[in-house]
Amino acid sequence: MSSVAAPGLVARAARVDGTPDLLGYFTPDDGVFFEHPSRALVTAGAAHAISVPAGPDLVARAACAVRDALAQVRSEDGPPPIVVGALPFDEETPATLVIPRVAFARADGATWRIVIGGDREVETAAVPTLPRGSLRVTSVPDPNAYVAAVAEARRRIRAGVLEKVVLARMLIAQSDHEFDRRALLARLRAAEPDAFTFAAGGFIGASPELLV
């Protein structure tokens, strides 16, 4: 297992006054955004990367690697350091997790700024707006085909052929301008204020559920 050791890292935490809008601190190119009315986490940069090779028991090996790496980070006052990333469903795909350089964490009404491995200033910025009417949205399948699929699924359930069906459709959004991920998050958050809003790389969304 490579890139596990994280020698010499120190986590320094400081309480942030008030309740700042953490979306303003989100840096889409190297950060992760996760927010719910009850908690939030925003990261920027990487103090240390943890590489987990592909193969059996990837999740268990990743957990061990995370424990080993965090055990080498000296934590001062405040919340402990964290690790962010995503684990693939396919164990033949390697995984990379990150101890962020800067993290903003909010829980129980308190907001903390955690800096690891040397200071990095992350300035808050105004969240841009997404001009209304600038998107062209296409449904796949089209609405009539989707309604027909729902009717067919219900028919098969009533006939005893199926017990459960999970139907999905895709919305393809196109724009003449580059998508600003912070603007998309702001729109999602406004539309679904009680959802878990998230962004990591190009993966952005708002979910009513938190799966653990």
Image: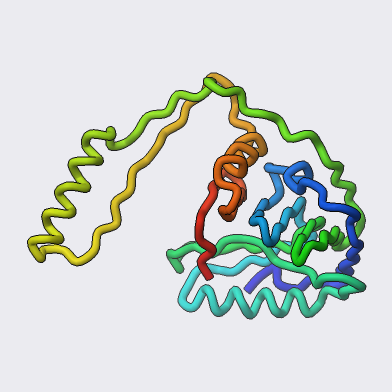
Q: Against 180, is 89 above or below?
A: below
Q: Against 4, is 183 above or below?
A: above
Answer with left or right where residue 117 lies relative to residue 39. Answer: right
Dividing the picture into quadrants, the one containing residue 86 is bottom right
Residue 123 placement (x, y as % from top left): 86, 42
Residue extending furthest toward the left: 159
Dividing the picture into quadrants, the one containing residue 99 is bottom right
Answer with left or right where residue 77 lies relative to residue 198. Answer: right
Answer with left or right where residue 151 lies relative to residue 138. Answer: left
Q: Give me the residue at 81% from left, 57% from top.
A: 101
Closest to the observer, 116 or 125: 125
Answer with left or right where residue 54 lies relative to residue 168. Answer: right
Q: Give me the residue at 11% from left, 60% from top.
A: 158
Dividing the picture into quadrants, the one containing residue 117 is bottom right
Residue 17 placement (x, y as % from top left): 91, 54
Residue 66 placement (x, y as % from top left): 68, 74
Q: Against 184, is 22 above or below?
A: below
Q: Give me the residue at 32% from left, 36% from top.
A: 140
Closest to the observer, 69 or 145: 145
Count every numbered label the image shows and give the total.
Answer: 0
Closest to the observer, 143 or 29: 143
Is residue 94 in view from this perspective? no
Q: Against 55, is 126 above or below?
A: above
Q: Give me the residue at 67% from left, 51% from top.
A: 33
